[in-house]
Amino acid sequence: MENKEIWNESNRPNLVNSTKLYFQDMFVGAKRMSRADFWWGFFGMTLVAAVLMGLFGWLVTKMPATDFYWSAVWSIAMIMTLGYYIISIWTASIRRLHDRNLRGWWILSFVIPIIGEIIMIVLTCLPQRNENNNWAKFVEDDQYV
């Protein structure tokens, strides 16, 4: 029987496909994500968030000082964009750690200033690890392999 892919890897990782995966699994951490998809998606999400936040920031500055309502709306939109960006990077990092057969708790290394960021960059740059990986890569006959 043919294996069905359940993990988070596109056939051709690129800016568009990988960014779609970031949006598709924005609130999912219990999967795996390939190294190429992680970095292409990171770049794509950063571009999308930067463009949207720049647009909302520009709109806030163009609102007259007396028009509090619309400047508040654009400010909230900018904050929500930043929130979605942080959530997508956070969960994608967890999926990337799963691809390395590491627990998602490693994401908490971010709380260590400077060293934590270096640890996460190194871990997300390492290749995938399939042997004894706790996170299923394929489904075969409704069984995880």
Image: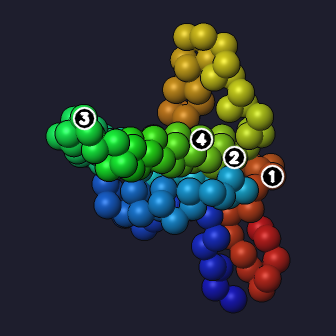
As drawn, the label of residue 12 is none
Mark 3 closeness class: few <14, some 14–19, many ≥20 residues within 10 Å: few
> What kind of residue is marked 3?
Ala
Q: Depth check: 106 or 127 in front?
A: 106
As drawn, the label of residue 65 is 3
In front of the other: label 4 or label 1?
Answer: 4
Residue 97 shown left or right of residue 41 in the figure? right
Identify the residue at image location x=74%, y=40%.
104
Mark 2 closeness class: few <14, some 14–19, many ≥20 residues within 10 Å: many
- Residue 49 can be seen in this image: no
Q: CA distance from mark 3 to mark 2?
A: 48 Å
Label 3 sits on a secondary structure element that is: loop
Q: Are marks 4 and 1 in contact (CB under 8 Å)?
A: no
Considering only order in the chain, which callout, 2 or 1, is on the residue closer to the N terminus? 2
Label 4 sits on a secondary structure element that is: helix
Residue at label 1?
134
Label 1 sits on a secondary structure element that is: loop
> What kind of residue is marked 4?
Trp
Considering only order in the chain, which callout, 1 or 3, is on the residue closer to the N terminus? 3
Q: Depth check: 81 or 132 in front?
A: 81
Identify the residue at image location x=77%, y=34%.
105
Residue at label 2?
98
Q: Are marks 1 and 2 in contact (CB under 8 Å)?
A: yes
Considering only order in the chain, which callout, 3 or 4, is on the residue closer to the N terminus? 3
Q: Is residue 83 above or below residue 7?
A: above
Q: CA distance from mark 3 to mark 1?
A: 55 Å
Res 32 → quadrant: bottom right
Q: Is residue 124 above or below residue 27?
A: above
Q: CA distance from mark 2 to mark 4?
A: 13 Å
Q: CA distance from mark 4 to mark 3?
A: 36 Å
| Image location (x, y in percent) of residue 38 | 48, 47
